[in-house]
Amino acid sequence: MANTVQLYIDGAWRDGASGETLDFWDPATGQTAGRVAVAERGDLEDACRAADKGFRQWRAKSAVERSAFLRKAAALLRERSAEIAPLLTREQGKPITQARQEVESSAEIFEWFAEEGRRTYGRIIPSRAQDVRLSVIREPVGPVASFSPWNFPLAQAARKIGAALASGCSVILKGPEETPEALARLVGALHDTGIPDGVVNLVYGVPGDISSYLIPHPLIRKISFTGSTAVGKQLAALAGAHMKRATMELGGHSPTLVFEDANLERAADLLTAFKFRNAGQVCTSPTRILVQDTVYGEFKSKIVDRAARLNVGNGSDESTHMGPLANPRRVQAMEAFVQDAIAHNASLATGGRRIGNQGNFFEPTIIEDVPQTARIMNEEPFGPVMILQRFTDFESMVKEANRLPYGLAAYAYTRSARTAAMVSEAMESGMVSINHHGLGLPETPFGGVKDSGYGSEGGSEAMEPYLVSKFVTHSLAD
Ligand code: NAD
């Protein structure tokens, strides 16, 4: 009998009112990994009422008390890493080393927000009259509806839960139905801290049904979504129609500029590691690699050699570098992107095919000579496919880097401080990383511009959308 992941509403685990469940699978074997409960409208209404009740209790706690709950949850996550990480690998496919890192980074995220929540300062404004005090108080916005994706089931959820709780908000999280179990353990760790009922709620079900119920709900005051640009635009429009604040962390198509003065060995090592991490299913994954023509051949041979030597296999094997894709849709998407590129006269430098007929395995793939009309030059691949492009000068590299409506992350490799500074200024993206892949720390901003969304999920900026400013003017006169 497969295990069933339940809903967590008002401090208790339960099945959905209808008893309906959805299956989820192990992407390495194609076998069923378990079932997840489906929330109906009645369950969602219960979650809204619980979040409202939880909010009243939680906001009354001091920032120091709230911090203690988050710290305790971080400690429990670390203690339970040996149980949680294998669940993450089984449902999502990522190598076990990356699953352990994700448990650790989720704990770090909770710790960062535990600290940052203690720094939500207001301010005093100089008054025009001696007996008048002008102050700005920062208050939690209220219950939040958050939607987290399947590529980093723990870390993306931890960012949303951490920011909400540290600000004094309660949260209803819609988790990813295809990867629900490790996240349920994370919520279980929060439960075991003794956090008041209703402060954290976890639901699963039909994504469109849940978002269309929660976003307009009068008790919900803020939305946070991580996922595709297409869905993000729909949810942002709904949030706008109901005057709800929104944080949108959406897709990317990250350009990486490799200049002739770069350390090519280091660039090839780092790009291989970061492109194929989580099988390329990362919103900040480097996708278009723009290489200066003087070093194109040398760089190509280095990176193709490294990609071709990656060990692709079941993520539970410690020696695996890249696991399967998370679902069969991604394999079909990779096949379609590669076939379309080849139909547009692109060349395969390595990879390009699915591996075997069991599980969702796809080869680490590098393609070149891809014209701008090919789909992969315009749509986010969200998988293990890298595009190599040849360029002669800085201006044409920048023009191509900024060509798309996406604006999440950009990368560059150069030994010139001047070129690095020029790249930092020229990129139309929310994040720029030079000579390394240094994005995604809890203490640094994480978010995009243009179609990649708005708001930040890291750094002190991440707290802002969960707080409202209340202006108080107080005359001391009788
Ligand atoms: P999808 O567009 O159907 O779903 C993307 C995410 O949005 C999923 O987590 C899904 O549960 C959720 N979702 C979909 N419709 C929703 C709705 N109406 N209301 C609320 N949530 C909804 O695509 P998919 O096949 O699951 O994922 C593939 C695409 O999603 C990729 O191409 C990638 O662009 C994007 N994605 C991005 C991230 C990220 O970190 N930014 C994470 C996961 C997926």
Image (cartoon, grey):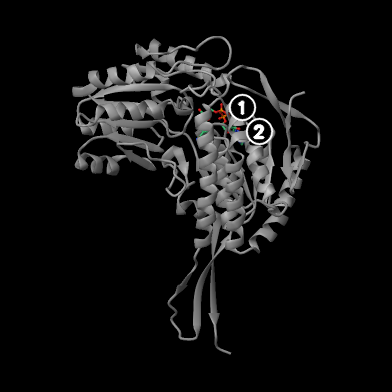
Identity of the amino acid at label 2? Answer: Glu
- The crowd level at tag 2 (other Cα within 10 Å; few <14, some 14-19, many 20+) is many
Identity of the amino acid at label 1? Answer: Glu
Query: Residue at horizontal 40%, vertical 34%?
Result: 405
Q: Quadrant of ligand 1?
A: top right
| Disc 2 + disc 1, Cβ < 8 Å | yes
Residue 82 image offset from top left, x and y in percent: 59, 35
Residue 96 image offset from top left, x and y in percent: 53, 28
Report the quarter where the N terminus lies.
top right
Residue linked to disc 2: 181
Residue 226 appearing in the image: no
**Real-space CA distance between mark 2 and mark 1, rounded to the nearest whole angstrom:** 8 Å
Q: For mark 1, give the secondary structure.
A: helix
Query: Residue at horizontal 35%, vertical 28%?
Result: 271
Q: Please determine whether, in this image, residue 210 is positioned above or below residue 71.
A: above
Left or right: 358 as drawn, with respect to 389 = right
The image quarter containing residue 253 is top left
Q: Please determine whether, in this image, residue 374 is positioned above or below residue 154.
A: above
Compare residues 208 and 388 and report the one nearer the observer.
388
Q: Which mark, by number, is residue 91?
A: 1
Residue 166 appearing in the image: yes
Residue 87 image offset from top left, x and y in percent: 62, 30
Left or right: 218 as drawn, with respect to 270 = right
Q: Is mark 2 within 8 Å of ligand 1?
A: no
Compare residues 56 and 303 and report the one nearer the observer.
303
Q: Which badge, 2 or 1, is on the more N-terminal residue?
A: 1
